Image (cartoon, rainbow, N blue to C red):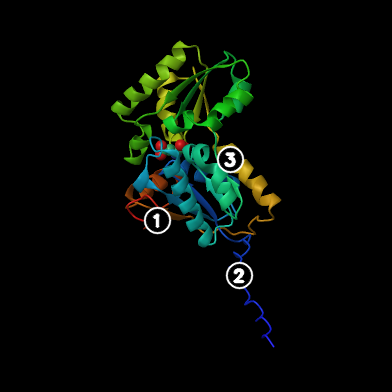
Amino acid sequence: MPAAPEPAAPKPVAPEPAAPKPAAPIGIFDSGLGGLSVLRAVRAHLPDESFVYVADSRHAPYGPRDQAFITERTLAIGEWLAQRGAKALVVACNTATAQSIAVVRERLAIPLVGVEPGIKPAVQQSASRAIGVLATQATLASARFQSLLDRYGDDCRFVCQPGHGLVEAVESGDTGSAALRALLTRYLEPMLDAGADTLVLGCTHYPFFAAAIRELVGDRLAIVDTSDAIARQLSRVLDASGLRAPGPAAPPRLCSTSDGRQLRALASALLGLDAPVESVTISSPHTADA
Ligand code: DGL
């Protein structure tokens, strides 16, 4: 008699990732130091939450990079944070959100919040119906940005200016030198000449220039920065997922893919955080640290 077929061996099952826990920290990342402006807002809004911040300063700026590179970095950092127990991820980078949020949302198992230039609030408040937008080249060229203009632009005219050199200035610790003010003047004057009364800061590095911009343009331009809106959105996402932390919060953990000196200096100056910065390696397929 032919032997009865052996029962098929059970297939190995990949372990399910552990469900995120309310007391776990929230991961927050940017190409570099800009996301600190978002960290400041979310900490103020959600004082019981703990945060792990990753600055990908080794690969900043993202603005001139292509979509594949930005998506790889966003995924690699999101996965790195999720593997270390982050319960949610804030992509505190307009450029990474514009280029990669749809893919990252599909691949990551934790809730995600991205950031976008504040076109909608700017349109709601502009009296002159002319609006300046300062953002990275990659953000301005993205389909997501075009879709924001199509959906919310209404009858407004937009003067869109890529902020070449501005991310590099923040990364090197410059938020107000004479050279930086000259660069900002070059970017803002065409907006004023076009009658703009509102300025959208479409990059999380740019709120660090708020004082310099105010000094240059006085109250001729109302500044729209979305940090507080992101904090409110994060709060809604945590509530919807049952992931609100019971408190008390642990001190933020700061990580950088470079040596972290500027991250430490800016976190101290801006957030009053005197925390050590961990230098971390996060591999992705096309980076030298892979
Ligand atoms: N903070 C990033 C953003 O909001 C800067 C991107 C870059 O590194 O060019 O877009």
Asked if residue 154 shows in the view, the reply is yes
Please state which amino acid type lies under the numbered disc 2. Answer: Val
221 in relation to 19, above or below:
above
Disc nearer the start of the sequence (2/3):
2
Which SS class for mark 1?
A: loop
Q: Quadrant of residue 6?
A: bottom right
State the mark number for residue 230: 3
Q: Decide: marks 2, 3 in contact (CB < 8 A)?
A: no
Asked if residue 204 shows in the view, the reply is no
Disc nearer the start of the sequence (1/2):
2
Which SS class for mark 2?
A: loop
Camera-nearest residue between 280 and 44: 280
Q: How crowded is mark 3: few (under 14 residues within 10 Å), some or many (20 or more)?
A: many
Q: Does the residue labelled 1 lie within 8 Å of ligand 1?
A: no
Q: Quote the CA–CA distance across marks 2 and 3.
A: 37 Å
Residue 270's x, y, as percent?
43, 43
Q: Quote the CA–CA distance across marks 1 and 3.
A: 28 Å
**Image quarter of the N terminus:** bottom right
Please indicate whether residue 15 sits to the left or right of residue 262 in the image.
right
Please indicate whether residue 241 sits to the left or right of residue 97 in the image.
right
State the mark number for residue 13: 2
Q: Residue furthest left?
A: 179
Residue at the image position 61 percent from the left and 27 percent from the top: 120
Name the residue beneath numbered marker 1.
283
Disc nearer the start of the sequence (1/3):
3
- Depth check, mark 1 against mark 3: the one in front is 1
